[in-house]
Amino acid sequence: MNTYTIKLKPIFQFDEDKFYQLCRQNPDLKLESNHQGAIIIMSPTGGETGNHNADLTGQFWLWNRQNKLGKVFDSSTCFRLPNGANRSPDVSWVKQARWDELTPAIREKFPPIAPDFVLELMSPSDNLKETQEKMQEYRENGVKLGWLINPPQGQVEVYRPGREKEVLDNPGSLSGEDILPGFVLDLEVIFS
């Protein structure tokens, strides 16, 4: 499984509506775009990665349902970042007050908002350098906390604004800090 990047500039440039239409016309493809307007065709995940992603999303969903502090999104949700990139984190979360600022019509498309939190789970088809660049892009666009989970390496990279990334080796859990108050992500199933 591979990821493909198609560079269209200067021949063609997608605006927000055209990219949304492209995604709707090709529902079998998972598409992103970077801040330079290149289209990124993502391959589907395999069974192990899909199962891990479902487990991770479920933990966030349960915490959020109990605390009602915001909205949890799965890997199918695309966000339009302030730099113009369209990204779909594996798991993301937006504070309720920020989500409420968006109109229902805007929420239906690709919300023009950087999530407060993002998680990327490395799969065999992912390129580590490109995923690290995506994490940096999230941070530069206003994401307050980001986790890059890399099961084959047994590592988690933690991204926060204004700080160097922190690398953790085989953590059993991760704290949501003050961004996700009271949340603790259990990583036992990921690193076992």
Image (tube, helix red, strand yellow):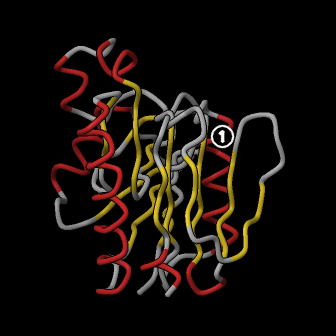
> Residue, x 53% and y 76% (percent of image)?
126
Q: Is residue 59 above or below residue 109?
A: below
For label 1, count other residues whose C-alpha is less than 10 Å away and answer few (under 14), some (14-19) or many (20+).
many
Q: Which residue is mark 1?
A: 139
> Residue, x 29% and y 78% (percent of image)?
51
**Position in image of residue 110 (x %, y %):** 30, 36
In this picture, residue 102 sits left or right of residue 180: left
> Residue, x 44% and y 28% (percent of image)?
113
Query: Looking at the image, which is closer to me, 77 or 16?
Result: 77
**Position in image of residue 91 (x %, y %):** 39, 53
In this picture, residue 44 sits left or right of residue 165: left
- The N terminus: image quadrant: bottom left
Q: Secondary structure at mark 1?
A: helix
Query: Looking at the image, which is closer to me, 175 or 77?
Result: 175
**Position in image of residue 7 (x %, y %):** 54, 58
> Residue, x 50% and y 61% (percent of image)?
120
**Position in image of residue 87 (x %, y %):** 45, 48
